[in-house]
Structures are given as structure tokens and as C-alpha cells.
Amino acid sequence: MKTPPTSPPWMPRALLAAALCNVVLGGWIVLWPDAAFAIAGVAAPNYPPLWQSLGVIAAVFGLGYAISAANPARHWPIVLLGLIAKILAPASIAHALWTGALPWTIAWMCAALDLVWWAPFAIILRHAWETFRNEGTADAPSEAAALRETHTSRDSSLTMLSFEKPVLLVMLRHAGCTFCRNAMADISRLRPRIESTGAEIVLGHMGTASEFTTFAQRYGLGEVAAVADPERRLYLGLGLKRGTFMQLFGPRVWWRGAKAFFSGHGAGKVRGDATQMPGAFLIHEGRVLRRFEHQDASDKPDYVGLATLPR
């Protein structure tokens, strides 16, 4: 049984404090709907039930924060929704202040109830992302063990295959990724030059064997040896983790993704973990001799140079 990820002690406490704040605020609005307007020095609304319904929503968010305090990393969607609410609410109030619809005396209430939570909620979300990125790394096999236990579509382990000839192992992203499709087109085009180095191409993926064979046939690579790794054990054993936000969504990724898309490499249904980073490795006699570590999802390895055995 997996141990649930732990969070720094201050994170549950911050969420419980936010929960208490929201529940008290919501109850105050429901029970005394005119009190906040009296303190701010503005006229109370003509329809108190509408204002009281906002109090109910605030209290419900508070209950959500209390639930997420049990495990902030696991319950990150609640924290994300809370952060969005605490950004949009001040934005609407700021517009009302700018247009004069509300007096500036209400600004301190906004700061006390929403702005103070931006930083802790953002840090909690970052912690949740890092926890997600590192999931499974503690139980990952060693590099040598991963090569021994992983069998290709030819019923031979990567270790055994690498004793017959050098292996250029290309661990792809999911088949629906435009960069994965671009990589397949590049490998198909460079295949004669890669194989002229004496290396055999092996393609790693996270889908099923049958689905990947159909996908590879579109690029003339249907008969190339492949490795199905839906549990990502080989990825993790080779040191390939999930990407950071910038590695997956940075400006260069968007730019190169647009170029690849309009070059005919499109996008499709996600098959596997969409956040998994790719990699390429030259394996010979059971050892990794060369490796290409992607700086972001759009990077392109020099497949021919990578496949060439070092002197």
C-alpha cells in the first residue's frame, strides 16, 4: 500500500485557517446580511437573499478547504478552485472601485478575505505539482534492472538485445502528442542512416502494443521493435520524470508545437501520461552509453549521432 504524500505542516494549518475564515464569513453574511455594508458605509442591497447566497457559497468553499487540509497534495483541485475564486472576486471588486460603483472603504475587506491567501494557495499548488512529478520515483527500478526486466515486442529483454547489437532506445511521449508524431516522422526519415551505424531502433511508449503498432504503421515503422511501458517503470528507471510546467508549456514549446502542428504532425487522443518527458538512449552490452535529456517537450535529439558507438 502506497504511503500518502506528506506536506509541510504549515499547509494543512493554512487551509484550516482559510476554512475557518470562509465558514465564519459565510455564516456572518447569512445571519447578518446588512452588517458588512454598514461597516463599509454603503447602502445594503435591496435583495438580501442574493447576498446571503454568496455567504452560503463562501461557507461551502470553507468546507472544501477543511477537506483538502487532510492531504493538500491529493486535494489540489479544491485549492485551485479556491485560488481562482480568490483572484476573480478581487478583480471584480477592483473594477467596481475603479468605476466608482463601490467606495474604497471596502478595499481592506477584500485584502483581508482574499489577497492574503494568494501566496499560500499558490505554494500549495506548486507542492502538489512537484509531488505529482516525483510520484513513483522512490519505487523506481535501477537503470540496469529496468533494462533487464523490460521485454520488447520481439520477446527479448533490452539487455539481451543490446548484447546482439547496439540499441537506440527512443522513449516517446503519448501518441497523441504533436512532438511524438514529429519524432516518429524524423525517425522514419533517418532510419537508413541510424541503422547504418549498426544500431537497432526500439521505440518505447505508454500505450497498448496493438494501438502502438497501428500508430507506428502510419510512419512505416510498424515492424520496428517496441516496448510498452504503461506503468512508466522503464521511464523512471532511465531517469525520465514528468515535466515541469515550463518543460511542458513554456513559450518555446508553444512555438515549436505550432510549427509541428502546421507541418502536418497534428495532435490526437492522449495515450498514457501527458506530462511524461521523452528521452533517447544508446544501449550496448547492458549499459547506457549515450543519453539525450530533453530540456523541454519540443527538443529534438540527433538520432544518428546518438546511435553511433563512442570510440
Image: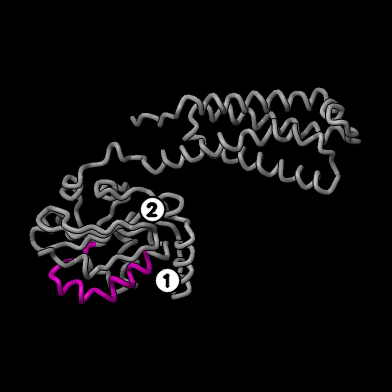
Q: What's the amino acid at mark 1?
A: His
Give whichever of 155, 266 is nearer the camera. 266
Quadrant hosting residue 52:
top right
Number of residue marks: 2
Quarter of the rendering occupied by the C terminus:
bottom left
Q: Is residue 288 left or right of residue 276?
A: left
- Residue at 36 percent of width and 40 percent of height: 135
Q: Residues within 10 Å of mark 1 (few under 14, many from 20)?
A: many
> Where 155 sits versus 21, above or below?
below
Q: Please identify the dominant SS of the magenta region.
A: helix
Q: Is residue 243 visible?
A: yes
Q: Is residue 207 visible?
A: no
Residue on which disc 2 sits: 272
Q: Is residue 217 left or right of residue 121?
A: left
**Sequence-wise, which precedes: disc 1 or disc 2?**
1
> Where 245 sits versus 303, above or below?
above
- Residue at 30 percent of width and 56 percent of height: 293
Look at the image and give the residue range highlighted in magenta. 180-202
- Residue at 45 percent of width and 60 percent of height: 269
Magenta span contains residue 98:
no
Residue 308 drawn at (x, y percent): 16, 67
Residue 86 drawn at (x, y percent): 66, 39
Q: CA distance from mark 1 to mark 2?
A: 18 Å
- Residue at 69 percent of width and 44 percent of height: 88
Q: Mark number for residue 65?
A: none
